[in-house]
Image (cartoon, grey):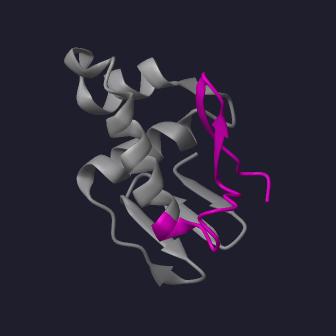
Amino acid sequence: EPVVTAGDLTIDLERRRITRAGEPVRLSPKEYDLLARLVEGGGKVITHRQLLTAVWGPAHVEDVQYLRVFVGQLRKKIEADPAQPRYILTEPWIGYRFNASL
């Protein structure tokens, strides 16, 4: 689907627009690519390796720290409480998944 709504978050993949509670959310290109890949996963776990390859390319498949930093930045921008994330969920030692069922 080109538009995904989860709670107060709306992600328009076609127009590359994100809003939270009706307000626009500004994301860097990498943050957007990461969020889009998670959303396109349809709630399934996406491994660190898959995300790193999709967003940064195959040369960065071992750079999990990049991923942690960007997930943290994304959570600050889209989560009401980044310390208790509802949208971007961590699957320890595996990867992340997007929770659209809010």
Task: Give the residue at x 59% y 67%.
Answer: 79
The number of discs equals: 0
Task: Pick whichever, 1 or 22, lies toward us.
Answer: 22
Asked if residue 56 is among those painted magenta in the image, a careful observer would answer no
Residue farthest to the right? 102
- At 70% from the left and 48% from the top, the residue drawn is 99
Q: Above or below — where is 8 with respect to 64?
A: below
Residue 27's spot in the image, x, y percent?
Answer: 33, 63
Residue 28: x %, y % from top left: 26, 59
Nearest the viewer among 15 and 87 is: 87
Which residue is nearer to you in this view: 32 or 82? 82
Identify the residue at horizontal 42%, vertical 28% (top origin).
51
Quadrant in which residue 17 is drawn: bottom left
Query: In this view, which residue lies farthest toward the left?
Result: 59
- Name the image quarter holding the N terminus: top right
Where is 54 relative to 88, above or below? above
Query: With 65 as the anchor, is 77 left or right in this view?
Result: right
In percent of the image, x 52 and y 50: which residue is there? 2
Horizontal arrangement in the rendering, residue 56 relative to residue 23 (left or right): left
The boundaries of the magenta stretch are: 76-102
Q: Quadrant of residue 80?
A: bottom right
Q: Quadrant of the C terminus?
A: bottom right
Give the side of residue 67 with respect to residue 4, left or right.
Answer: left
Magenta segment includes 92: yes
Return the x and y of residue 66 as percentages of the image width and height: 32, 38
In the rendered image of this protein, does residue 20 appear above or below residue 52? below
**11 w.r.t. 94: above or below:** below
